[in-house]
Amino acid sequence: MNDIKNTVLLAETHIRPYIRETPLKFSETLNTYLKCENLQHTGAFKVRGAFNKLLSLTPSQRKLGVATASTGNHGAAVAFGLKTLNIPGIIFVPENASPKKIINIRHYDATLEFFGTDCIQTELHAIEYAKKNNMIYVSPYNDLAIIAGQGTIGLELKKQLHKIDAIFVPIGGGGLISGIAGYIKSVSPETKIIGCLPKNSPVMAESIKAGRIIKMETLPTLSDATAGGIEPGAITFEFCQKYVDDYILVSESEIQDAMNTLIKTDNLKVEGAAGVALASLFQTAKKFEGKNTVVILSGGNINDEN
């Protein structure tokens, strides 16, 4: 098992000039801390992992160019990184990707192509495209450099809040929670790491239950950033097995309610994945009453009609 803590500390030294230290806001009404990654560059946490990966490429690898796949936020983060570091690349997104997130990717002048209707179809296509064209594939989650970049959120949290009893983290492919959990468990093993997923797309939770990465039919969800399958052999599965204490599944109405609540209580407009994390705290509120809880607001790229 890789030592995530050391890779996170290394990532911190590489990416700090390119990312924001996002605020940790205490919500008096909700009685929880909110880690506002919705205020990160590109409107989501993904720039952390994207920059760590891109900065790790050699000059010859940069010349080859990059291919990646994304439901939106990772794509925008990579596009921002490619533009900043002057690296060529192409970003594949599912045909049903969020219009807001497509606009966000195009904002950074990226080459964009549509493929598939599920993120795993898009990912497998991008991997094949990269092989055929001798490019570097940048995974949204199945890469230690990506995981370590996301783990810098955990490093910031420990600097911002001494005692953390539980952290609620949305899960799709598992890169975010692997990074945060891997770091936090090394410095604060008593902190509970709670994985949060929509009932309509609970692939990682069901895979953990099955003891292997499974394929399953998923339904549309407000949490598009955590929707769809997981790449076969993803290293995040093992990290989730080792570091995540519990998994919470929430309904679409619970996600919407959490998103609406944040607007009313803290004037924060967040996307569905962040709503999943807050809804999971609501579902377990009694269990964590009187505890220092943190909810990861993973992104704020939401369509105007939501």
Image: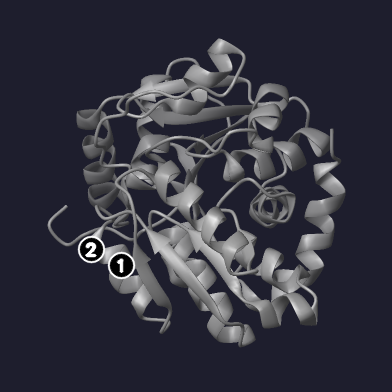
Q: CA distance from mark 1 to mark 2?
A: 5 Å
Q: Is residue 239 left or right of residue 138?
A: right
Q: Assess disc 2: are there few (<14), some (14-19) or many (≥20) residues with their C-alpha within 10 Å of its C-alpha.
A: some
Q: Which mark is residue 102?
A: 1
Kind of residue at disc 2 = Pro
* Residue 9 x/y as whole percent: 83, 56
**Circle 1 Cα neighbour tier, 10 Å, few/some/many (<14 / 14–19 / ≥20):** some
State the SS at label 1: helix
**Residue 173 drawn at (x, y percent):** 53, 39
Q: Up-down: is 250 above or below 20?
A: above
Amino acid type assigned to the residue bearing label 1 in the image:
Ile
The answer to whether mark 1 and mark 2 are in CB contact below 8 A is yes
Residue highlighted by disc 2: 99
Q: Residue at x 64, y 84 (%)?
A: 85
Q: Give the side of residue 205 with respect to residue 176, left or right.
A: left
Residue that appears at 46% across and 64% down: 75
Question: As drawn, which residue projects farthest toward the front?
Answer: 132
Q: Quadrant of residue 47?
A: bottom right
